Image: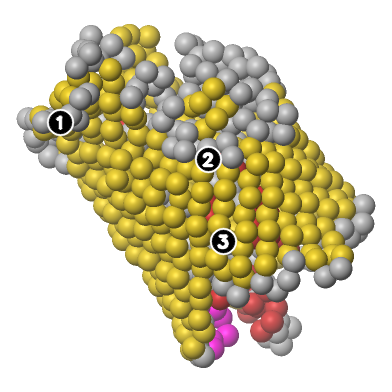
């Protein structure tokens, strides 16, 4: 109760401070256009970043635009992030990808789609394989703790992916495309169509993909296929002071998981995901109230893990895990402008439910006959729900210095009813926490800015971390229903420099997390399955520190060169040992060239992606050698209607293994691949 009172006091002080400054302002000093510009700069509340806003952002941010995504034609989410400083991914093949921000991943990085939480919390991590990278129009990244604005799961940062069509400014030209990739003998068919009716626009998007097993320099990576269909459809409507968005997204696919080299077949079969999302924006003609935004979503995920292993000459052994999850989310925030002060207040809430069952049995190798036995699953029927309220006040002290103060209160409850069929049940736990943050942006000159942020953060354990018990792919994972929530403190500072030909940025950070939740290898073997036993546990305290820098030099309007570097080190303070799955030093060298000749528009990109040796490893974790992979991308627009993409990835056919890959029995990196995409634009 005291924390709630403190939170209310902070909010009242913010409002009082805003009104006090309002009384001292000349009412005619601020024009409406300045008010709108101020509101547009609240990217740390919306996580909706535009490239022109990055320079004066008060946090470390990145923006990946539609042009870059169209040129590189990503087939995996890992391709989306691999050139971004401070962002990488942990993957199990092309389909199962866990984004990593400054060494933190899974439920510590809040994944959002169109401005609201994407629910992908399952055994083994936050895989985010339900989102087709082909549908992504732009990506906004907030690096560093964002818990005060976005709540639990944003302790490491936020990645917000906006889909094609969601908003009038994200509607591409209508097109139909066909894609072929040599390294997987894979093909895709993709279309987008939109139509305007005065104030209303509707859009339809579909994708069918049939990607085979990945070919590497060391052989075929078994069970690395991806086959299925995806759809994205919706509408946008604007009238006077109101605007509405409605989006429906879904997928059904078979996605291979290549972690077991002897598996006959292993992957997610007939996986389904459905999402309905809506957004309401109201912009009144009021001097101080700039508007309110309401975003809501309902999501359903059916996950079917299928594992078929050799048994004898007549039968194979099949294990299936069915895990279903539903979630409902809402986010509401509103802005109030008082002179040079912007006050944002907001509320968000969620409710998620999970249930599971398993099937196992012997399958005839001759007839494929299979009569499975149904048994209890890996998690009891359980639910988690919660809400949070926040207030954030921004103030321009003068033309050079601005700052903010923010506060938040969260309440989250997890509940698993008594059920004797499951290992964990009859458990209820509640987490609640107040968090605060503050920061400053100082404009040294028109071309130089310095920013500093500090604050606290919070993460409540997920349902899987609390209640999971059983085999998962290549290990037996055991949850802990009595895990303590993570509590963090972070400092983030940086400098940006911008001139006509050069952009430079550097940022450093330090994040300390108490009660850090880790899925750790115990070194023990499960007697029934023969698999290693991994357990979720609280570490007393961990510290992550590091930084990124980036230089972008424009030789001409057509030719530019970019280099960026990311570094992070993470240790358990109590044992002075390194954490699992921390990325090595990563360096990207990128050369871009664009132009037009004889009516043909063209873009070229050459990338050298380097990952250094990682020998700062946890117990039972192996060091990984470094490598460099060279990729080339090109895009040609021959006319108004014909577009052609050609790329060559891993040009030198390098055999390599990423330290963050969960495939450890071979070098899993895709070999040289020629990729072709032909599009008809209309």
Viewer-proximal residue among 539 and 668: 668
> Residue at point 53% right, 38% down?
184
Q: Is residue 169 visible?
A: no
3 or 1: tag closer to the N-terminus: 3
Residue 201 forms part of the magenta stretch: no
Residue, disc 2 = 185
> Residue at point 50% right, 57% down?
189
Label 3 Cα neighbours within 10 Å, binned few <14 / some 14-19 / many ≥20: some
Residue, disc 3 = 177
> Residue at point 68% right, 63% down?
643
Q: Secondary structure at mark 1?
A: loop
Residue 355 lies in quadrant: top left
Location of residue 556 in the rendering, given as x and y in whole percent from the top left corner? 92, 57
Location of residue 560 in the rendering, given as x and y in whole percent from the top left corner? 85, 51
Q: Residue lying farthest left?
A: 420
Viewer-proximal residue among 32 and 72: 72
Q: CA distance from mark 3 to mark 1?
A: 40 Å
Q: CA distance from mark 2 to mark 1?
A: 30 Å
Viewer-proximal residue among 2 and 223: 223
Q: CA distance from mark 2 to mark 3?
A: 17 Å
Which span of residues is magenta-colored? 285-293
2 or 3: tag closer to the N-terminus: 3
Label 2 Cα neighbours within 10 Å, binned few <14 / some 14-19 / many ≥20: some
Report if the CB atoms under discs 3 and 1 are less than 8 Å apart: no
Label 1 Cα neighbours within 10 Å, binned few <14 / some 14-19 / many ≥20: few
Viewer-proximal residue among 105 and 490: 105
Count of marks, rendered view: 3
Above or below, comparing residue 296 to residue 202 in the picture:
above
Tell me the quarter of the image containing the C terminus.
bottom right
Q: Residue 173 shows which numbered tag?
A: none
Q: Residue 369 shows which numbered tag?
A: 1
Location of residue 219 in the rendering, given as x and y in whole percent from the top left corner? 54, 22
């Amino acid at each position: 109760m005291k924390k709630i009172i403190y939170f209310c006091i902070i909010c009242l002080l913010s409002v009082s401070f805003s009104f006090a400054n309002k009384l001292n302002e000349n009412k005619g000093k601020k024009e409406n256009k300045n008010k709108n510009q101020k509101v547009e700069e609240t990217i740390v509340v919306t996580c909706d970043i535009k490239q022109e806003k990055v320079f004066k952002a008060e946090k470390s941010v990145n923006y990946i635009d539609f042009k870059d995504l169209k040129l590189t034609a990503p087939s995996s989410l890992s391709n989306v992030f691999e050139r971004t400083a401070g962002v990488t991914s942990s993957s199990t093949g092309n389909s199962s990808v866990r984004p990593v921000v400054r060494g933190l991943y899974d439920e510590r990085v809040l994944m959002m789609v169109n401005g609201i939480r994407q629910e992908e919390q399952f055994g083994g991590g936050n895989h985010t394989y339900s989102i087709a990278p082909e549908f992504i129009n732009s990506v906004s990244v907030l690096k560093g703790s964002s818990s005060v604005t976005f709540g639990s799961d944003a302790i490491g940062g936020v990645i917000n992916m906006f889909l094609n069509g969601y908003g009038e400014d994200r509607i591409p030209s209508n097109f139909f495309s066909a894609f072929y990739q040599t390294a997987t003998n894979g093909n895709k068919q993709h279309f987008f169509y939109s139509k305007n009716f005065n104030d209303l626009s509707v859009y339809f998007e579909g994708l069918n993909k049939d990607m085979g097993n990945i070919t590497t320099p060391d052989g075929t990576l078994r069970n690395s296929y991806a086959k299925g269909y995806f759809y994205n459809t919706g509408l946008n409507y604007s009238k006077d002071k109101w605007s509405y968005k409605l989006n429906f997204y879904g997928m059904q696919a078979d996605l291979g998981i290549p972690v077991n080299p002897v598996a006959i077949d292993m992957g997610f079969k007939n996986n389904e995901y459905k999402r309905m999302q809506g957004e309401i924006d109201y912009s009144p003609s009021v001097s101080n109230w700039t508007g309110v935004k309401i975003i809501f979503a309902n999501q359903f995920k059916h996950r079917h893990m299928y594992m078929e292993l050799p048994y004898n000459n007549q039968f194979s052994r099949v294990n299936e895990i069915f895990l279903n999850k539903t979630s409902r989310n809402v986010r509401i925030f509103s802005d109030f402008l008082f002179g040079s002060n912007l006050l944002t207040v907001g509320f968000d809430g969620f409710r998620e439910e999970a249930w599971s069952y398993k099937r196992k049995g012997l399958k005839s190798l001759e007839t494929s006959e299979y009569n499975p036995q149904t048994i209890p699953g890996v998690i009891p029927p359980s639910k988690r729900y919660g809400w949070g309220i926040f207030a954030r006040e921004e103030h321009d002290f003068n033309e050079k210095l601005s700052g903010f103060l923010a506060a938040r209160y969260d309440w989250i409850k997890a509940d698993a009813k008594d059920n004797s069929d499951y290992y964990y049940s009859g458990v209820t736990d509640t987490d609640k926490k107040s968090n605060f943050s503050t920061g400053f942006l100082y404009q040294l000159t028109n071309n130089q800015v310095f920013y500093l942020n500090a604050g606290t953060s919070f993460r409540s354990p997920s349902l899987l971390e609390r209640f999971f018990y059983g085999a998962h792919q290549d290990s037996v994972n055991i949850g802990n229903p009595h895990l303590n929530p993570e509590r963090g403190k972070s400092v983030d500072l940086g400098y940006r420099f911008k001139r006509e030909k050069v952009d430079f940025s550097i940022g450093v950070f330090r994040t300390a997390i108490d009660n850090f939740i880790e899925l750790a290898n115990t070194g023990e073997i499960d007697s029934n399955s023969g698999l290693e036993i991994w357990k979720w546990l609280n570490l007393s305290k961990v510290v992550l520190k590091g930084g990124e820098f980036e230089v972008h030099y424009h030789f001409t309007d057509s030719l530019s060169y970019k280099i960026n570097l990311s570094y992070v080190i993470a240790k358990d303070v109590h044992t002075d040992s390194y954490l699992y799955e921390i990325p090595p030093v990563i360096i990207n060298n990128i050369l871009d060239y664009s132009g037009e000749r004889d009516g043909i528009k063209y873009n070229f990109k050459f990338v050298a992606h380097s990952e250094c040796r990682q020998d700062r490893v946890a117990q039972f974790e192996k060091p990984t050698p470094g490598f460099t992979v060279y990729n080339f991308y090109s895009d040609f627009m021959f006319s108004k209607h014909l577009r052609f993409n050609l790329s060559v990835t891993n040009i030198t056919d390098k055999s390599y293994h990423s330290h963050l890959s969960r495939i450890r029995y071979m070098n899993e990196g895709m070999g040289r691949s020629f990729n072709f995409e032909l599009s008809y634009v209309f």
